[in-house]
Each structure stands twice: as C-alpha cells, then as structure tokens.
Amino acid sequence: MRHCLLLLITLPWLSIAQVYLFQVDTLHVGDGTVLTPGYLYVSGDTIVAVDDKPLPNLLPDSTVRLEGHAYPALIAMSTLLGLVEIGAIRATRDYAEQGRFNPNVRPIVAYNTDSKIIPTTRSNGILLAQVRPAGGILAGKTAITYLTGRTWEEASIVADHGQYIYWPARYRRTGWWAEPGTLKENERWEENVRKLYDFFAHARSYLESDVPPHRRNPRYEGLRDVILGHQPVYIQADYAVDIASALQFADSFDLSMVLVSGRGLAPMLNELARRNVPVVLQSPHTLPLNRDDAIDAWYAMPAKLAQHGIPFAIAINDIWDGVWQQRNLPLVAGTAVGYGLDPEAALMAITLTPAQILGIDNRFGSLQRGKEATFFVSTGDVLEIATSQVTAAFVRGQRIPLVDHHKQLYQQYSRIYGLPVQ
C-alpha cells in the first residue's frame, strides 16, 4: 500500500495559540460543496477558515500537506457500537434491559471504549456514532459519542438524547430470507400499541403535575425531554401500516419524530415528505420486503427519498448484519450513488444530515468556520471501496491513531508468509 501522507508522520498536539493550515487535493465540505484544492485552517479544536486558495490575511504557524480527499467525520446512526462485542456470546451483549418499557435506560454508561470493533470502524472515517439501546418496545435513550476516548465520559458528546421505540409490528413474516413464509397478523398488536399510548399518557399527566422530589418516577422522568418537545423520538418501523400508526402516535402526543428503518416505506413517501419527517434508512444492502417489489427497490430508495425532498441518513442495521458491519457505512452510501443518488448527496447522508437529525450540526457534519475540527483524509473517494484508504483522522483538532485489530493481523501474517507489508 502506498502511504499517501506526504509531510506528516506525527503531528504535535494543536495549541489554541497556533493556526494549522491543512492543504489537500480535494476538500468535501459536506454540504455539497467541493473545493479543489482545499485549504483548511484549524486553531485548537476549531475550524477558523475554509477556502480553495490560501488566505493572505491568515498566516498559519505551520502548514501540513495531505494528499487525497478531506471529509467531515462520518456518523454511524442507530448503532450498537460499544454495546456488543461478539453477538453469539451473551456476556458481551449489553444493549437491552428486561421489560418492554424502559425510558430511563442510558446506554452511554454501558459504552465500552475498549471494544476492538470501534477501531476497525474508525479506520474507515467513521468518527461519531449514535448509540441506541435494544429490546422491548420503549427501549430507552440514545447517546451521541465520539469513537475515541478512554472512558464513556470522554467519548460522550450528548449523553442522553431522545427516546428509541421499536414500534409493534402489525404483521410478522415467517420463514427466513432464503425460504420466506407467509405473513401472519400479530395477535397482540393492538394490546401493545394501547399500552404504549397509556404509558405516554400517564407520563404526560405526571410531568404536568407538581411531584415532590421523593415521589419522582424515574421512568416517567426519562420521557421529560421528549414529551416537552426538547428532543426527538426515534421510532423503528418497517411496514407502511406500522409507519402510519407510528405517525398517528407522534401526532397524538405532539412528538418530534424520526423514522428509523422503514423497509416498507415506499407507499408512505408522499406523506413523509408532507410532514417533513426525517428518515434513518437502515441497510440499503438488502432484499425488498415484499415479493412483488423490484429486486433493487431498497438499493434505489435513497435516490427516491432525495427526489421527494425527505431529509434522510443512511445507516446499517447491526442487529440484522452484525455490529462489525458499521465499518462498511461509506460503501453502503456509495452503492446508493450507483442507483441514482448524487455523490455529494450520498456523502451528506452520512455526515451533515445525520448531524442535523441529531441536533449537533452546529458542531459537526461539515467542514465550515466555527465547527469542530473532526475530519479525516482518504487517498481516493471514500465512497469508492477500490480507491479509498483513510490515511489520517483528526478528532477535536488532534490526530488519532488508525491502528486496529485487522491491520495488526495483516502485519503479523505478512511477516510470516513474506507478503508485502503495508
């Protein structure tokens, strides 16, 4: 592998008093703008200027020349990163609690910064994540984290963000992907939906009352920011009938809703566009939900969302695919380009739009003045698996190591079998 980091072997810790100029061949701002070449000025942990030429009125203390493409940090949405290590080993799964209604659950305190999966994900430019709980119906809060840090406190960006709901499915498909069976109606669907309505109604009444501190209910308190409209509720649903009932639920309690997954959302596109409901589109690399759908229906869905003007983020459902698949996020976004999505729109779906959905776009999602200097550099287009090789990454203005378990194994066996050492 040709190492394309030209003048930089190690970078000293950035000082607030210093201004560093990062000069790259191509700079993808993240909002659709591409600068060739690109000049990124950084002071401390903050971007102070971005341009396609040197700024004569801003003289840097040091210039760093990086060959390739610079990008804002990629964001993994709705993931179990840090909460599971080996899916088949129960002792390494720490993402679910007993019971169906756990709005007080905080996955951030279970976040494992020592996970070996996180560095392999970071090596592909994914530097931020929304970590979600799993299990039950009302699973709990999500957390927004850096994919760096020695403790969960260091990794935390927003420790408690919104609520995550797994909407009860009206129908269940039998069989498996190779031999799909028939659809069966969920006999407990109405009961589960009614319980969810009742839980939110009781929580709203509780929050409207003056409850003394010694009588506070931790579960109802967990819904405070959602019911008061300060944070969104993420509702995961697949079939159109479930999406429609989830939208009705959000209307009933005046919730700010984000739809997650939605493999059967095609009939709901016009309604979602009318309501301007953001969508976290999970695992576009999958077969269609219905037998009569086109084989590439899910691959083409990002382009359809863009055509309808629906804000969307591309994500990977790591309950289906395995949490280690998060490292393939740029590949999944790149595939959407092959099915009609504009390349910069695909980049926005894993950078700026996720940041907007999470409410952190004032700090992340694009390389603009005043935002945090959290970015990476790749030898080629990060959406092209054949040409992309991340050579440098920076979090809060500081360069982070890109060593992971896969690279260590490659180095080890390269020496044993006399292969070229990268």
Image (spheres, rainbow, N blue to C red):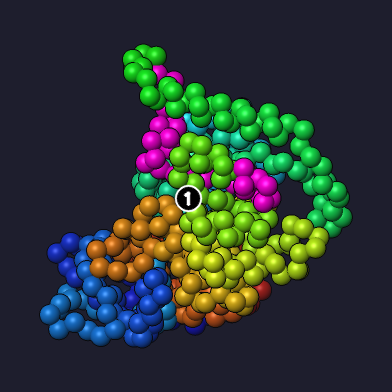
Left or right of 185: which side holds 310?
left
Residue 231 position (above or below residue 389): above
Query: In the figure, residue 415 lies in which quadrant?
Result: bottom right
The residue where tag 1 is placed is 130
Left or right of 170: which side holds 111?
left
Q: Residue at x 39, y 40 (%)?
A: 229
User: Can you see residue 326?
Assistant: no
Q: Residue 375 location, x and y as percent?
A: 37, 67
Q: Residue 5 location, x and y as percent?
A: 39, 79
Left or right of 378: which side holds 22?
left
In the image, the segment drawn in magenta is: 216-245
Query: In the figure, residue 9 lies in which quadrant?
Result: bottom left
Between 195 and 396, the one lying in front of the other is 195
User: Can you see residue 60?
Assistant: yes
| 107 within the magenta span | no
Element at label 1 = strand
Q: Residue at x 41, y 58 (%)?
A: 355
Residue furthest to the left in view is 57
Q: Residue at x 57, y 30 (%)?
A: 197
Numbered-mark total: 1
Q: Give amino acid for label 1.
A: Gln
